[in-house]
Image (spheres, rainbow, N blue to C red):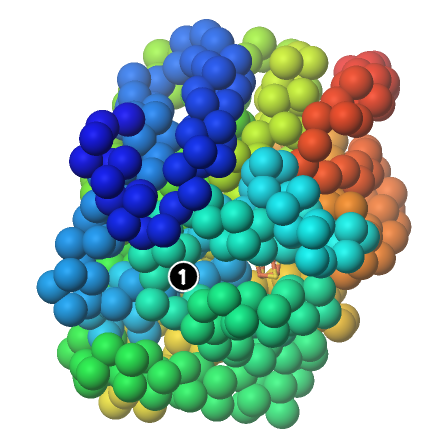
Amino acid sequence: MTNDNRQMWSDLGIDLNRHDILLNALGPIYKEIYLSQKNRPKGMGFFDFVVGDIHGIRVQELRKHAMNGGKVIATYCVFVPEEIVWAADAIPVGLCAGAQFSVPIAEEILPRNTCALIKSSFGFKLGRLCPYVQTSHLIVGETTCDGKKKMFEILGQHQPVYVMEVPNKKTRLSRELWTGEVIAFKDVIEKLTGNKVTSAKLSQATRLVNERRRALRRLYDLRKVRPVPISGKDALLVTQVSFYDDVTRCIKQVTALCDELESRVASRNGVAHDNAPRILISGSPMAIPNWKLHHILETSGAVVVCEESCTGTRFFSDLVPENGGTVEDQLKAIAERYMQIHCACFTPNDERLDDIVRLARDYQVDGVVHYNLQFCHTYANEAVKVDEVLAKEGIPLLRIETDYSDEDAGQLRTRIDAFLEMIRK
Ligand code: BJ8
């Protein structure tokens, strides 16, 4: 922690005392969860560095951008089309909302029976703990769930917030509404930045974001192999970091990591025993530093090989077509790509069920763990259908409902042990 950083945090209005407690707690947790792993790929060194410097260099880069007149746009959901932000020479940053630390701060205002992701994100702002929020000029929210959309109203009392309306159905009318929202978002970003979103700029941004998607796809494809060359924890961290790191640097680091993993695959150098149960996690996103479920699974003898979530396949699976055209054509193509994100906010959402079965087959999993943040009603109710579909396919399922605290860690471990025992037979 350098003096430069402390000065920067202070300038950003960070509550330094509280922030010290947060960062001091993160180090030992990371050591226990990440650095204790055996036989990690060397390429994870970069990601270790990023976490070790979580509120340092990247925040400095964003500040520099802001001081040069650029804008920083903070987001909480993969529905916000980042191509538009890049095309206006602004920088999008996916905010972390995975820490229990900020939850009690949020509970001073928000109802306790709100999901941990909402409380954590709100608590970071209220407690002045997150330099990324403090650096941003606009927070872009969405209407994906009731808790979030109401929280954004309160958040708007503390910082400028713009909310995009994500439809709840996938009909033609809903698609039209969403396309209109994407166009309106472009207008908002143009107005904020003073920069025109041109066709050339959109093409360039689309290629860039697609390239990161391809790099992450390559990483996930390597997890299909037996023995798997990277732990689930490490792969999750790579995705989590890619939400806020510089895109070009992220592509370079993920590519280098994949090159290394390919040689591991060639020499059958895996991170888990051949008979370790392979697990697909499906459900709510896991924002940094939410590593709880992966850690319990992987210290219980399993290996997580895929995440069907927004910090997993939903983040990078589909590409935006790169065939250019007018700005209007491109915005329509962007809108259509984002409608392929099968979030539980949609009804019906059968495509997600198809995805889970397909991923379970592709990644040769022995079981699926459905991860549901407590008080998230969309995922909790959709889990009923996930259960039915997987039972029909003969794929074992464990449904977990939890939050960010460690209070239920013992109970979760007992249930996970029993599940792994069952699928090993
Ligand atoms: S596209 S999954 S990132 S909304 S867990 S806050 S839904 S009560 S996070 Fe999500 Fe976008 Fe969908 Fe993905 Fe509400 Fe549920 Fe909390 Fe949630």
Residue type, mark 1 in image: Ala
- Give the image quarter of residue 35: top left
Q: Residue 408, image x and y in percent?
A: 79, 26
Q: Quadrant of the C terminus?
A: top right
What residue do we see at 77% from left, 57% from top?
Answer: 111
Q: Residue at x 83, y 17 (%)?
A: 414
Q: Is residue 255 visible?
A: no
Q: Is residue 409 left or right of residue 223?
A: right
Q: Residue at x 30, y 21 (%)?
A: 45
- Badge 1 density bin: few <14, some 14–19, many ≥20, Cα 10 Å: many
Residue at screen point 52% across, 20% down: 29
Q: How many marks?
A: 1
Q: Is 345 situated above or below 374? A: below
Quadrant of residue 6 within the rendered picture:
top left
User: In x, y percent, where is residue 194?
Assistant: 20, 83
Q: Is residue 52 above or below residue 102?
A: above
Question: Dividing the image into 4 quarters, which one contains the N terminus?
Answer: top left
Q: Residue furthest left?
A: 68
Q: Which residue is mark 1?
A: 74
Counting from the top left corner in percent of width and height, residue 57 is at: 23, 39
Element class at badge 1: strand
Look at the picture and state if 57 lies above or below 205: above
Tell whether 368 sits left or right of 260. right
Whereabouts is ligand 1, in terms of quadrant? bottom right
* Nearest to the observer: residue 364 or residue 56: 56
Say if residue 2 shows up in the picture: yes
Q: Is residue 398 above or below residue 390?
A: above
- Residue 155 at what x, y percent from top left? 55, 66
Q: Is mark 1 within 8 Å of ligand 1?
A: no
